[in-house]
């Protein structure tokens, strides 16, 4: 069962979800850890390169996942959901997608604006060019600080969205006792349409 159905997610959507969940949680953990490291240490440089490399993997997967979602609509929400819960579910997913794209892009812009001019080399193999940074943001230091703030506060917002997303999934599983969580773990519910 590769594709989504009206009652459940297919294997591709499930793999996208959990692969990205692991990568994003790892990136958030690594990012929080890196905040306190001395910038001039060689080990810190390697961690930043790893963080940037995985960020580009997340950005690529996010694009592929969004493309897959456009051609494979998600299953319908559970029938008994309150209208406010439905709105919250849609807004939560929009917020998650927005932050999954915004964090890698703000990180890329931050590195591009940095006066240090450090190149990004994905997994020490593939160089990535810097993005053009709008001159209206002021000096390189000002532009870097602007994108750094966006990146950092965006990470905190993403953490909050993930907590609410996970809490909602457990609420559906433990309190509402519907198939919402089961649909993201197994293709079984998707097979109910056949």
Image (cartoon, grey):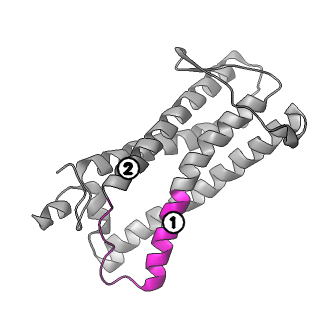
Q: Is residue 83 visible?
A: yes
Q: Residues within 10 Å of mark 1 (few under 14, many from 20)?
A: some
Residue located beneath label 1 in the image = 92
Q: Is residue 141 left or right of residue 8?
A: right
Quarter of the view holding residue 173: bottom left
Spatial CA span between label 2 and label 1 = 15 Å
Q: Residue at x 13, y 66 (%)?
A: 192
Q: Locate residue 81, reporting x and y percent.
A: 37, 82
Picture disc at residue 158: none
Query: SS for tag 2?
Result: helix
Q: Residue at x 47, y 37 (%)?
A: 60
Q: Residue at x 22, y 55 (%)?
A: 186
Quarter of the view holding residue 166: bottom left
Residue, far right: 139
Q: Earlier in the sequence, mark 2 or mark 1?
A: 2
Near-viewer residue (11 or 26)? 11
Q: Locate residue 23, reporting x and y percent.
A: 47, 40
Residue located beneath label 2 in the image = 17
Q: Which residues are magenta?
A: 73-96
* Quarter placement of the C terminus: bottom left
């Amino acid at each position: 069962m590769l594709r989504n159905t009206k009652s459940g997610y297919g294997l591709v959507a499930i793999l996208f979800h959990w692969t990205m969940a692991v990568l994003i949680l790892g990136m958030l953990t690594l990012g929080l850890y890196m905040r306190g490291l001395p910038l001039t240490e060689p080990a810190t440089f390697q961690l930043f390169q790893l963080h940037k490399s995985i960020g580009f993997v997340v950005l690529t997967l996010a694009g592929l996942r969004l493309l897959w979602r456009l051609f494979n609509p998600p299953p319908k929400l559970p029938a008994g959901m309150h209208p406010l819960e439905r709105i919250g579910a849609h807004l939560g997913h929009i917020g998650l997608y927005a932050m999954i794209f915004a964090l890698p892009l703000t990180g890329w812009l931050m590195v591009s604006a940095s006066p240090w001019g450090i190149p990004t080399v994905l997994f020490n193999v593939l160089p990535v060019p810097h993005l053009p940074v709008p001159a209206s943001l002021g000096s390189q230091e000002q532009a870097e600080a602007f994108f750094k703030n966006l990146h950092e506060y965006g990470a905190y917002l993403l953490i909050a969205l993930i907590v609410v997303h996970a809490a909602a999934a457990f609420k559906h599983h433990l309190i509402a006792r519907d198939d919402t969580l089961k649909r993201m773990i197994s293709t079984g519910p998707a097979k109910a349409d056949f």
